[in-house]
Image (cartoon, rainbow, N blue to C red):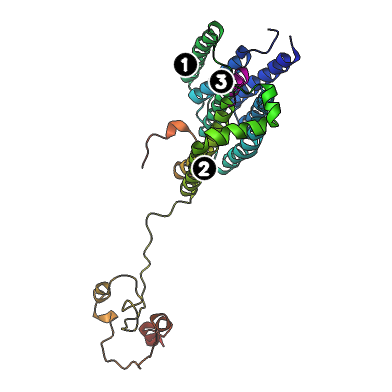
Amino acid sequence: MSAEALVFDILAVMAVISAAGVVLARNPVHSAVSLVVAFINVAAVYLILRAEFLAAVQIIVYTGAILVLVLFVIMLVHQEDLPEFHGGRPVQRLLGFILGVMLFGEVAVGIVTHTMTAQPGPWTPEAVQAVGGNVQAIGQVLYSGYVLPIQATALILLVATIGALVLARPETPKLRVEIPRQVFTISLGHPRGTDQQGRLDDVAALGPGYLKPEAGERELVMAKSGDEFVDQPVWGEREQK
Amino acid sequence: MSELTAQHFLFLSAALFIIGMIGVLTRRNVLVIFMCIELMMNAVNISFVGFAWEQNSMIGQTFALFIIAIAAAEAVVGLGIIMALSRRLDTVDIDQVHELRE
């Protein structure tokens, strides 16, 4: 057994154990920590499979960004103690497990009985070494044949950012409570005719006691703009003194 | 099993994918289901990178790179949905989410 295969087996076993921990852990924080271990093992598997750049991206994006985001959300949302794996829904659990084992059996049979035959690509380890390394090779492939997908990915990331902003925004209250104003001013100097919110008909509907008759004893107030006029004393205040 | 062959990483990929699938099927916490989906994406990535390694190709690694980028976008949107869900219904139990609108 070569050392490469031995290290791969160890990493694979650790990845599978920690992946099982993701599913079996009761606390979501424990699941997330278990997932970090699984992702780091997968990154090491990438290293064995000569994908050094992807290993770095895996560590940075998955364990660095996504898992931190998941942990933040775990702490932000209200967690209740769900009864899963501890008494609840044995049928669902059993069915999921049986389905998983069956599918794994099918895939295993497929893996064992079939061998892939294909034309090997040009990127032998020597060719990768010739252009300078894995990053240079992946850059050459990426930016010669996949320019349009890169642009599409940029667009998707932009849309996802906007979508996350819209989704995570605090919900606006659906019903704004109307606080009726008791004191307001009617004036031609105001842009809307009155500083009360709403239509002037509502003001008239309040009744005669609320409206001061025109050409009253109130002194004339000169206002240059509506905003300035709002600051002037209004009828209600005058009557109280 | 003396040398590293395609079967090694294919079995690892299948095992991780099916563990993630069992998690999606059995768990009820939305966040754990989300993490299991990430696990399944990683399993697919292992397959891509493994075939690229076997066939001396770079295209598999390119695909895996795109999958990681899309997974990041998916994580952002998915966690936003989970936030909105927990804010609106005050639960992370997937069984309590029956309808798309109140």
The residue range painted magenta reads B49-58
Q: So how many labels did they put on this image?
A: 3
Q: Nearer the viewer, mark 2 or mark 1?
A: 2
Say which amino acid is labelled 3.
Answer: Ile
Does residue B21 appear to the left or right of A5 in the view shown?
left
Q: Is residue B96 magenta?
A: no
Does the magenta stretch mainly form a helix, a strand or a loop? helix
Q: Chain of mark 3?
A: B
Q: Residue furthest right?
A: A3
The residue that label 2 is drawn on is: A154
Residue at screen point 56% across, 23% down: B48
| Quarter where residue A40 is shown | top right
Front in this rendered view, residue B49 or B70 = B49
Residue where numbered disc 1 is placed? A95
Is residue B12 depicted above or below A138 in this figure? above
Residue named by callout 3: B19
Do residues under tags 2 and 1 come within 8 Å of each other at their CB atoms?
Answer: no
**Above or below, A22 relative to A110:** below
What whole-number distance in Å separates the C-alpha atoms at marks 1 and 3? 14 Å
Residue at 36% from the left image edge and 78% from the top image edge: A183
Q: Is residue B52 magenta?
A: yes
Residue B11 x %, y % = 59, 14
